[in-house]
């Protein structure tokens, strides 16, 4: 029974240990994540972003951000753990080591006469014949009598001096750290113990496994439903026009689960009238087109109208009943667009190429949603090939201001960017009628915008040229510069109500054949991750080329300095296609800003496959080595597509004729400074 009680006393320690194993690392992870998020919160400080309240950390918002269900649960578990610690500490202080001198209230080494005298005095106080209290009886038997025996009996005293216990050496005992009532298997307690074992050892792991499997079977690693990925994959087409990307995007399974209520009919009808011009309806048959639109699945109608409310900035007119659905759509949009992008650029043909045209349309839709700019405003105009969409992402800029600015022959957003700050201020104040404070807000946003440059090389490791079937290594550095000196920052997006980090997509594509040869997502937010990735990639590349340790260390150090200076390494491989010359384009596309995308042009000349050992002869026959790599300044053949509005990448711009071909190596490099992408100058149906 005593052993049972000792095991029962260990139960709180057992519970505390089981609770601490998951809670402590989880809490540390949450705290580190919170600290990281705080360091990443580099956002725009213009008046529009301030008024939006998106980054305003009021006391109520801080409480709401902290008082989540998970945080409350963790806090409650920590309270339980503190109580257990206090209980264990109190219990341990009550548990005393057997010391006969202390029990008899004697000094160590007391004489036998003193021991007997003290024993008689305590017997009068605790003996059952003198004190009828059961607790006194128990204390007399278990402590006083045993202490007296340990000090007066020769054998007991010898055992105490040798082993610390009057009964001699104590055997090793093992027990179960469970409460006493569970260890009593007689009567109802046996059923409780059985339920405890079945619940903790069988049912709880089974429930956890079922929940995990059901969720993992429904969602991907990016918290996107597998049904959505399947739908996106089968609806993606190589000729998908940017204006048609919306139709694929809104068919996500997440949006199909949005409830459609009868009370939403009237607000949606009003919203339809506000955004009707953006729905690409045929005005000649407007009645038939409207009827066809409303005959779609109600969830699709609701989703598209709410997305258009974001693009046209008509969300202020939404009733409270639609606000929750509107927020749900916007919150999941970046994840869905990222997966839709992957569905466009993943290998689709025998050569392992994806599709460029839908990928560009997806990026354009993402930019428009984040900046709340209508897709129709991306159409090319007579004076601006970029349209007026990039202007609208700036604070205090509307169509009236744009018309006034255009009259002064500042017709493109790039021209506005390239102006001197004082000249730009004079233009906006004197011509557009803006105040000095409003111009200052515009300057703050312009300083936040990323300026991107590309430095791309392609080579076949260990060889002088490229032959069909070779593994070509692509090595690109993407650099970002901002007027305010930041590297990673949150975009100016006052109309997008959620935290959104900039993401960039690097694409190596053939714009004529609509093929994406290589793609990679690039981020400038986490410098530590970028340093690790670049160091590992450079080290593997140098070791593969046979470089020594000193050369490898120098290359890694240079890569680290580049990353800290605002560059990101893009390293990949692709198989050289069949013999011929290929005009390729490297794109770096931002999913959050309009007018910041860049591209640079490459030319690959692939030689016919020859027998081993004859590569050099083949190069001689084909011509100079400098013509066999990547060449600049080649005009790409324009390819026209039927679409409702033109992509800003649908027509390649003319390249700078001042090339540097004579400085290129055997496999060459692309020009370091990427070119701003152009909009097409015509609309086709």
Image (cartoon, grey):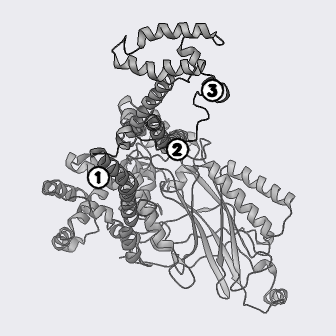
Question: Crowding at label 1, few (<14), some or many (≥20) Cα neighbours within 10 Å?
Answer: many
- Give the Cα distance between marks 1 and 3: 85 Å
Which of labels 3 and 2 is toward the front? 3
Q: Say above or below: 176 vs 626.
A: above
Image position, residue 525 (x, y; %): 57, 49
Of mark 1 and mark 2, the one earlier in the sequence is 2
Screen quadrant of the N terminus: top left
Q: Is residue 248 left or right of residue 409?
A: left
Left or right: 368, with 119 as reference point: left
The numbered mark at residue 222 is none
Looking at the picture, does residue 504 appear above or below residue 31?
below
- Image vertical order of residue 638 relative to residue 227, above or below: below
Mark 2 burial class by Cα count in 10 Å: few <14, some 14-19, many 20+? few
Among the 4 quarters of the image, the one containing residue 670 = bottom right
Real-space CA distance between mark 3 and mark 2, rounded to the nearest whole angstrom: 28 Å
Observer-nearest residue: 487 or 208?
208
Q: Which residue is mark 1?
A: 326
Quadrant position of the C terminus in the picture? bottom left
């Amino acid at each position: 029974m005593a052993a049972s009680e000792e095991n029962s006393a260990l139960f709180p320690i057992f519970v505390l240990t089981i609770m601490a194993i998951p809670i402590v690392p989880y809490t540390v992870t949450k705290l580190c994540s919170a600290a990281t998020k705080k360091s990443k919160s580099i956002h725009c400080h213009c008046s529009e972003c301030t008024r939006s309240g998106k980054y305003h950390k009021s006391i109520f918002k801080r409480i709401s951000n902290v008082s989540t269900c998970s945080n409350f649960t963790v806090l409650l578990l920590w309270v339980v753990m503190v109580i257990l610690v206090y209980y264990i500490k109190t219990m341990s202080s009550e548990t005393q080591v057997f010391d006969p001198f202390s029990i008899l209230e004697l000094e160590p080494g007391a004489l036998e006469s003193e021991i007997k005298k003290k024993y008689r005095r305590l017997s009068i106080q605790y003996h059952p014949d003198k004190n009828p209290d059961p607790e006194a009886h128990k204390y007399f038997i278990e402590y006083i009598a045993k202490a007296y025996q340990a000090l007066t009996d020769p054998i007991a005293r010898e055992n105490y001096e040798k082993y610390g216990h009057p009964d001699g050496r104590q055997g090793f005992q093992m027990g179960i750290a469970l409460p006493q009532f569970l260890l009593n298997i007689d009567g109802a307690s046996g059923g409780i113990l059985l339920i405890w074992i079945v619940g903790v050892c069988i049912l709880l792991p089974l429930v956890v496994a079922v929940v995990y499997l059901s969720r993992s079977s429904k969602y991907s690693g990016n918290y996107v439903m597998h049904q959505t990925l399947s739908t996106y994959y089968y609806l993606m087409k190589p000729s998908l026009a940017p204006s048609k990307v919306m139709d694929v995007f809104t068919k996500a399974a997440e949006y199909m689960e949005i409830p459609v209520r009868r009370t939403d009919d009237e607000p949606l009808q009003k919203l339809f009238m506000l955004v009707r011009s953006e729905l690409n309806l045929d005005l000649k048959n407007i009645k038939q087109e409207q009827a066809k639109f409303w005959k779609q699945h109600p969830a699709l109608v609701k989703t598209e109208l709410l997305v258009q409310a974001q693009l046209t900035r008509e969300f202020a007119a939404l009733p409270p009943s639609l606000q929750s659905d509107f927020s749900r759509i916007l919150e999941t949009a970046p994840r869905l667009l990222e997966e839709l992008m992957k569905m466009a650029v993943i290998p689709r043909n025998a050569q392992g190429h994806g599709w460029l045209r839908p990928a560009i349309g997806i990026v354009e839709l993402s930019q428009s949603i984040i900046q709340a700019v209508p897709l129709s405003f991306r159409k090319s105009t007579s004076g601006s090939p970029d349209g007026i969409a990039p202007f609208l992402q700036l604070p205090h800029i509307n169509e009236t201001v744009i018309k006034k600015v255009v009259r002064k022959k500042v017709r493109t957003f790039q021209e506005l960017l390239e102006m001197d700050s004082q000249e730009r201020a004079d233009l906006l104040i004197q011509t557009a009628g803006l105040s000095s404070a409003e111009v200052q807000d515009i300057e703050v946003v312009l300083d936040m915008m990323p300026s991107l440059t590309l430095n791309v090389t392609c080579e076949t490791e260990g060889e002088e040229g490229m032959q069909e079937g070779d593994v070509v290594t692509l090595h690109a550095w993407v650099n970002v510069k901002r007027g305010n000196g930041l590297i990673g920052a949150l975009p100016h997006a006052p109309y997008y109500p959620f935290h959104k980090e900039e993401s960039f997509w690097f694409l190596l594509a053939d714009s004529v054949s609509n093929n994406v040869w290589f793609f990679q997502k690039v981020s400038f937010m986490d410098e530590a991750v970028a340093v690790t990735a670049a160091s590992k990639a450079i080290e593997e590349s140098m070791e593969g080329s046979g470089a020594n340790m000193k050369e490898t260390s120098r290359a890694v150090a240079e890569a680290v300095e580049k990353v800290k200076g605002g560059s990101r390494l893009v390293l990949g491989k692709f198989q050289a296609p069949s013999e011929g010359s290929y005009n390729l384009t490297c794109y770096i596309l931002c999913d959050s800003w309009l007018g910041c995308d860049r591209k640079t042009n490459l030319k690959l000349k692939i030689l016919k496959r020859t027998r081993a050992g004859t590569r050099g002869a083949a190069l001689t026959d084909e011509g100079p080595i400098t013509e066999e790599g990547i060449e600049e300044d080649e005009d790409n053949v324009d390819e026209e597509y039927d679409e409702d509005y033109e992509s800003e990448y649908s027509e390649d711009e003319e390249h700078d004729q001042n090339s540097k071909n004579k400085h290129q190596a055997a496999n060459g490099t692309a020009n370091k400074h990427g070119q701003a992408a152009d909009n097409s100058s015509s609309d086709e149906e």
